[in-house]
Amino acid sequence: MALFYLNIRNGIGYVKDEEGHDYADIEAARVQAMVGIRSLISEEAKTGLLDLTGAIEITDDFGNLLSVVSFEEAMDLRQTGRAP
């Protein structure tokens, strides 16, 4: 297990993960980042806004950037043609 920090960067600003979380590896941290993104987006969607320009930045104990998971990457968007 290793300690990873999942910091959120979106249209509102930057939220630093002050506590961090233990995950087996970087892939497990990326999976959790996707879960977190989907939760954030589901709350935003209730307001009628779907902003996929954000990301979760995964860092280690020293603040080194290990991976970035974009909001867009965490979603599979399907859109049909608009009705006239």
Image (spheres, grey):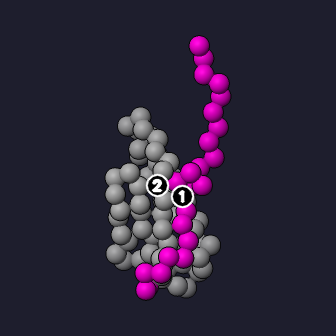
**Residue underneath mark 2:** 54
The quarter of the displayed image where residue 49 is located = top left
Dot 2 alpha-carbon crowd within 10 angstroms: few under 14, some 14 to 19, many 20 or more:
some
Q: Position of residue 62 (x, y in %)?
A: 43, 86
Which sits in the foreground, 82 or 28? 82
For the stretch drawn in magenta, what is the main secondary structure? loop
* Residue placed most toward the observer, 35 or 61: 61
Q: Taking the image as drawn, is residue 50 in sight?
A: yes
Residue 56 x, y percent position in the rendering: 48, 63
Q: Quadrant of the N terminus?
A: bottom right
Magenta segment includes 78: yes
First in sequence: mark 2 vs mark 1: 2
Three-letter amino acid code at the position of disc 2: Gly
Range drawn in magenta = 61-84
Residue beneath the point at 59% across and 80% down: 24
CA gap, disc 2 and disc 1: 6 Å
Say few, some or many: other residues with alpha carbon within 10 Å of mark 1 (under 14 / 14 to 19 / 20 or more): many
Which residue in the protein does label 1 denote?
A: 70
Q: Residue at x 55, y 62 (%)?
A: 69
Asked whether 43 falls inside the magenta stretch, the response is no
Image quarter of the C terminus:
top right
- Answer above or below: position of 74 versus 25: above
